[in-house]
Image: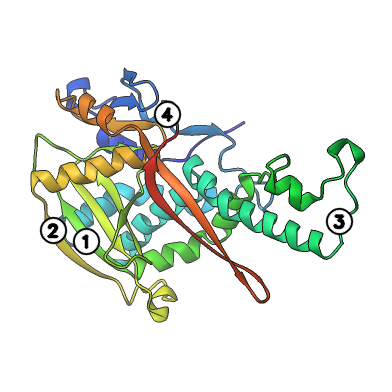
Amino acid sequence: MALDHYISQVHLRNFYSPAMGRRKMYAIRKSNFKCFPPRSEDVCRIENGSTNDYLLNSRIVEEFMKQVEPYYNDSVNKFRIGEIDNDSIFVIAGFIAYILSCSPTAMRIGADPLQHMAEATAVLVDSEGEIPPPPKELGGASLTQLLRDKIANIKIDEKYPQALAISGILHRTVTFGNFDWDILINEELSSPFFTSDFPVVIERSKDPRIINRIVPLAPDIAIRIRPSLEEDRRNGNLNFQYFSSRTCRLKRREVLEINKLVVRCAEDLVFFRDNHKWVEPFVQKNSGFWIEPITEKFPTANGVLQLSTMRIARRAA
């Protein structure tokens, strides 16, 4: 079985520490605050994580990543020096789209709206008498009652939302590449950017309908993608004709705010280059959060309107 990395090793190696000969990085678990020095190949990997049997070609996402991973470092440097081209936009947007397809966090979040959709469909079918009577062992309760009372539940195979995401990975890459990007330059040597096992951080925007994405690319550079609701921009092409960028040189407090979001959005593992004394207390302080999917349902004349989003929320103990 292949051990597939859902966070690219080429990305993680950018966070290798000079203190360890640039052969390892520092890591800390949010779940137990254990600190250890892993290599990139030792973390963020799952047996056959990129294999998806719902797809005709179960390993097709690996073909996509052959267009991304070998060019990651060159693309990051182009963003760093301001020589951004279509190839570098594709690589960085594709790197993000891959994380949003194959990481455990992405699959967990993606399963939530599908579960709510399946439950709403089951209730609708039950109301039309299309589901056989329940067995006596369940007390004669209908499926609707069983779901309402949480005696029964519908579980989504998380490989299914992964399959949907992989099927749309090129479209998502193109969409991201046609939005506005902030190139976030970190010149604060004492506060380099962190990364994590889910480094695609979410950030509230002024518009409640829009969630920005912040992604650390290396300790000295990150990007913020600011989505647009304009239909043309959401349906651009690989020419990235709607792409725009601006460079922002961050102050220390701005870097710390981004690192706070990196820690809070991580599923469990936080990685960092320099083991400053402030890092472990900082991670511990922000460890009790994660990304929580939210699905709201609104009855309509024809059924139920379902709206799904996500937020950073305190994680239940």
Q: Residue at x 60, y 47 (%)?
A: 59
In this view, the residue in front, 72 or 268, is 268
Mark 1 falls on what kind of element?
strand
Q: Position of residue 192 (x, y in %)?
A: 17, 38
State which quadrant residue 207 falls in.
Answer: bottom left
Q: Which mark is residue 72?
A: none
Name the quarter where the N terminus is drawn: top right
Query: Which numbered disc flags the more N-terminal residue, 4 or 1?
Result: 4
Task: Please report the residue visible at 72 percent of the width from the left and 39 percent of the height from the top.
Answer: 151
- How many C-alpha atoms fall within 10 Å of the one at disc 3: few (<14), some, or many (≥20)? few
Mark 1 highlights which residue? 182
In this view of the protein, can residue 119 be seen by the observer? yes
Q: Label 3 amino acid?
A: Ile
- The residue identified by callout 2 is 248
Q: Tell me whether the residue at label 2 lies in contact with that at label 3, contact meaning CB atoms closer than 8 angstroms.
A: no
Pick whichever of labels 2 and 3 is earlier in the sequence.
Answer: 3
Q: Is residue 94 above or below residue 27?
A: below
Disc 4 and disc 1: Cα gap in Å?
29 Å
Marked residue nearer the N-terminal end (3 or 4) = 4
Q: CA distance from mark 3 to mark 4?
A: 45 Å
Q: Amino acid at mark 2?
A: Cys
- Crowding at label 2, few (<14), some or many (≥20) Cα neighbours within 10 Å? few
Circle nearer the N terminus (1, 2): 1
Residue 146 place in picture, x, y as percent: 75, 45
Residue 131: numbered disc: 3
Which quarter of the image is occupied by the C terminus? top left
How far apart are the alpha carbons under marks 1 and 2?
Answer: 7 Å
Q: Position of residue 166 (x, y in %)?
A: 55, 55
Residue 126 appears left or right of 158: right
Q: Which residue is mark 4?
A: 43
Task: Mark 3 vs mark 4: give the one in front.
Answer: 3
